[in-house]
Amino acid sequence: MSESEPVLERIYTVPLGRAWVAPRYRRAEKAISILRKFVQRHMKPEAVVIDPSVNEAIWAKGITNPPRKIRVNLSKDDEGTVTVTLAEAGQ
């Protein structure tokens, strides 16, 4: 991953409630795919890179209990790659 300046940076609250439609043993996986689709729709990226902290936040309570929503910072670089990181809680 290159360390280039972000061209576009936005903070979103991503609703993950649709993950609860999936079977109990696949909810966190579904939440990750919902997050990827959300990023695809809103940022039109060439590639999506999810930071490990976001993955750990979704999987924190196990596969059966992902959060209903998550606040993330999306930054797009000049190559079209979008990096998903956790937004700071104090903003």
Image (cartoon, grey):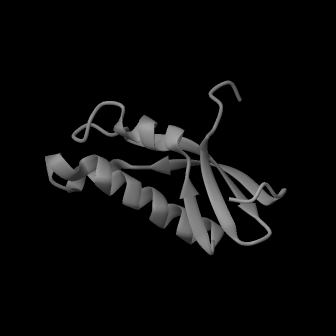
Using the rendered image of the protein, determine whether residue 31 is visible from the camera's viewpoint. Answer: yes
Position of 37 with respect to 61 (left or right) is right
Q: Is residue 18 above or below residue 65?
A: below
Q: Is residue 87 above or below residue 13?
A: above
Quarter in which the C terminus is drawn? top right
Would residue 26 be found to the left or right of residue 79 on screen? left
For this rendering, which residue is in front, 40 or 16?
Answer: 40
42 is higher (above) or lower (below) than 29: below
Which of the two residues, 39 or 14, is positioned nearer the viewer here?
A: 39
Q: Residue at x 36, y 52 (%)?
A: 31
Residue 70, x across and y down, in percent: 49, 41
Please state the horizontal and vertical placement of residue 22, each as a whole percent of the image: 20, 56
Q: Which residue sits at x=37%, y=41%?
A: 68
Say left or right for 7 vs 20: right
The quadrant of the picture occupied by the N terminus is bottom right
Q: Residue at x 30, y 53 (%)?
A: 29
Which residue is outermost to the top?
A: 90
Q: In this picture, is 4 found above or below 45?
A: above
Can residue 18 be seen in the rendering of this structure? no
Query: Which residue is rendered at x = 43% and y = 37% of the image?
Result: 56
Residue 19 rendering spot, x and y as whole percentages: 29, 52
